[in-house]
Image: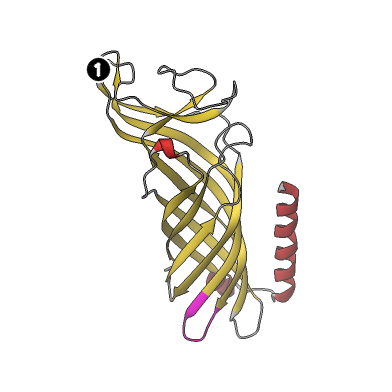
């Protein structure tokens, strides 16, 4: 799959460059656009027991370089780079293997498999409350695709995005999990079995420098057979003022 994605990027970039004339410094500036997006991640195939939150806010920033595909400048091919963060808020914790301190395992968990498990309301005679628990993954992305700009300043984009994992961690805020009753904040910087890359199509529809966007991730967050096969569908707003 990786080889096919890189081949598609190379062919599209070559096709776009064949349409483009040698750009001047001024035209290069005009072809560059900088933007950012805010969105909500709707997570697919998340186990019901995690009590995942409906609102899972995320953000990305990006830069595009465009190649005109026609003389009137309506159709463009673009390729660029960006950084995007995806979050999953829930009331569960992330474990690996056959043991956790509460001995609460989903069925048929492998020895090296990642899984979500619920925190009990009491442990060692003490009540436990979860104020915040989330998994966060940040990717360095390479977006590319086609954009059509109408004369009335309405524009639409169809593209594809490939990203490499930059960071993956979990955060927990609530009662100490050992049943001591103390309130703690914890951050785990090493998550096992996370896929190193993600990919999927995206689309935007906008007017002037603001629009709506959707990204459908085709790849699972966790490696196959080593974690729940969950993935986000991101819907939000995109802004390209520069």
- Give how far across and how far down residue 97 sits, in percent: 54, 21
At x 50%, y 58%, the residue is 62
* Residue at (47% x, 64% y) in the render: 213
- Count of residue discs: 1
Q: Where is residue 205 in the image (x, y as percent from the top left)?
A: 48, 71
Residue at 53 percent of width and 43 percent of height: 230
Q: Is residue 221 visible?
A: yes
Q: Badge 1: few (under 14), some or many (20 or more) residues near its Cα, within 10 Å? A: some
The range drawn in magenta is 149-155
Q: Mark 1 points at which residue?
A: 126
The residue closer to the viewer here, 190 or 44, is 44
227 or 200, which lies in front?
227
Image quadrant holding the C terminus, namely bottom left
From this view, report whether residue 144 is shown above or below residue 106: below
Q: Position of residue 101 (x, y in %)?
A: 41, 16
- Residue 72 position (above or below residue 136): below
| Secondary element type, mark 1 | strand
Q: Which residue occupies the extreme top position in the image?
A: 124
Where residue 44 sits in the image (x, y, percent)?
50, 48
Q: Does the magenta stretch include residue 230?
A: no
- Depth check: give the residue in front, 160 or 77: 160
Residue at horizontal 60 percent and vertical 31 percent from the top: 226
Residue 191 seen from this side: no
Q: How is the image coloured?
A: secondary structure
Instruction: Locate residue 170: give its quadrant.
Output: top left
State which quadrant residue 52 falls in.
top left
Image position of 103 with respect to 46: above or below = above
Q: Nearer the viewer, residue 49 or 17?
A: 49
């Amino acid at each position: 799959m990786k080889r096919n994605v890189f081949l598609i990027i190379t062919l599209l970039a070559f096709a776009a460059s064949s349409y483009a004339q040698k750009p001047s410094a001024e035209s290069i500036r005009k072809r560059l656009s900088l933007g950012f997006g805010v969105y909500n991640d709707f997570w697919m195939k998340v186990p019901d027991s995690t009590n995942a939150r409906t609102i899972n806010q995320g953000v990305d920033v990006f830069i595009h370089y465009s190649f005109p595909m026609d003389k009137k400048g309506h159709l463009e091919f673009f390729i660029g780079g960006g950084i995007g963060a995806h979050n999953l808020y829930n009331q569960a914790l992330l474990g690996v293997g056959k043991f956790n301190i509460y001995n609460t395992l989903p069925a048929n968990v492998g020895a090296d498999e990642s899984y979500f498990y619920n925190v009990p309301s009491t442990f060692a005679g003490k009540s436990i409350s979860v104020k915040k628990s989330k998994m966060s993954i940040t990717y360095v992305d390479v977006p590319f695709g086609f954009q059509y700009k109408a004369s009335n300043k309405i524009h639409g984009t169809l593209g594809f995005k490939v990203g490499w994992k930059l960071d993956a961690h979990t955060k927990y805020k609530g009662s100490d999990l050992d049943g001591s009753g103390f309130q703690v904040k914890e951050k785990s910087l090493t998550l096992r079995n996370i896929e190193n890359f993600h990919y999927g199509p995206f689309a935007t529809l906008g007017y002037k420098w603001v629009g709506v966007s959707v990204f459908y991730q085709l790849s699972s967050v966790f490696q196959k057979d080593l974690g729940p096969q969950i993935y986000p569908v991101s819907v939000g707003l995109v802004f390209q003022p520069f």
